[in-house]
Image (spheres, rainbow, N blue to C red):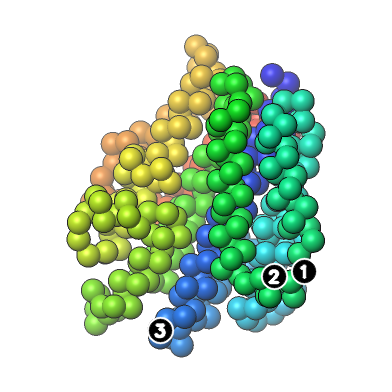
Amino acid sequence: MLSRSADHLYWMARYMERAENTARILEISQRMALLPHVAKVGASEWRAVLNIAGDSADFTARYGEASPAEIVSYMTLDPLNPSSIYAAIRAARENARAERVSITSEMWESLNATWIEVRELTPAKLARRGYRDFFDWIKERSHLFRGITMGTMLRDETYDFIRLGTFIERADQIARILDVKYHVLLPSPQEVGGAVDHFQWGALLRSVSAFRAYHKVYHDTITPWRVAELLVLNASMPRSLHACHDNISEIIERISGARTTEVGRLAGEIHAKLHYGTIEEIYKLGLHEFLTGFVRRNNALSTEIRNSYLVSA
């Protein structure tokens, strides 16, 4: 496969996954804003949205102090913010347009229809529509696109690079969400096990579609360390870091074939830490330190994938 084509396919998938995860992050922040505790952590809750996306400095330079309405506008429809839902859908569509001969017509039609509807939105229209409805719609469109991809694509290198982009982006976003939200939501001793504490962590699990999975695995009260264990180490949880890197390692092995590559070495190193690690070891190191290290290694893998297989920016 030509590296230019691989580049378009990889980033098409990453941008679609990014749009979905941005919708999930905004949805959980809106849920938290409805809680009684918002007076205590409301500002940090909304600032966390910017920290997860890595956009805090840009937002502050443009808007100053964070307000919920400005953050929602910045992260949904701002064409100048590369992390906004608008910009992500636009970039996914442009990459798909460049590869119309490689993807199926159903994939193109689904993504193009999503872009046309997002393009027509304004902040006023979005407010009338309702943020919750919009976030759910973005998630549904991402699920639809992913389902069409799985149901219509040949299992060849085209499909592999699409899936590789999806899982690299998903792992990065889940690690960022867990790291930032863990510190925002970590309760005081008086709040542990209380109704607000339960709702907070329940909302986090719902934001990554893991609420039912948590109760199926643990059959118990939601606790921060078990949430971390589920989202980091549980290979059966589709959005866990472990599950993402199970898929990444398999895809890279298939792309690389019998060759020994730096991409394969980096992927194997990350996968081994997740496959053989324990939550006790992670907490001994420090969850924040583990997650920031993971994001750094995941980004290094992404850079090596770009250098080895894709067109450099």
> Against 205, is 70 above or below?
below
| Residue of label 3 | 37
Tell me residue 67's x, y (percent): 63, 81
| Residue of label 1 | 122
Count of numbered badges drawn on the protein: 3
State the mark number for residue 194.
none
* Secondary element at tag 2: helix
Residue at point 46% right, 88% down?
39
Closer to the chain start, of discs 1 and 3, is 3
Q: Nearer the viewer, mark 3 or mark 2?
A: 2
Quarter-wise, where is residue 270 in the image? top left
State the mark number for residue 126.
2
Label 1 to label 2: alpha-carbon separation: 6 Å
> Is 93 situated left or right of 184 in this image?
right
Please name the amino acid that badge 1 sits on.
Answer: Thr
Please name the amino acid that badge 3 sits on.
Answer: His
* Secondary element at tag 1: loop
**Contact flag, marks 1 and 2 (Cβ < 8 Å):** yes
Label 3 to label 2: alpha-carbon separation: 27 Å
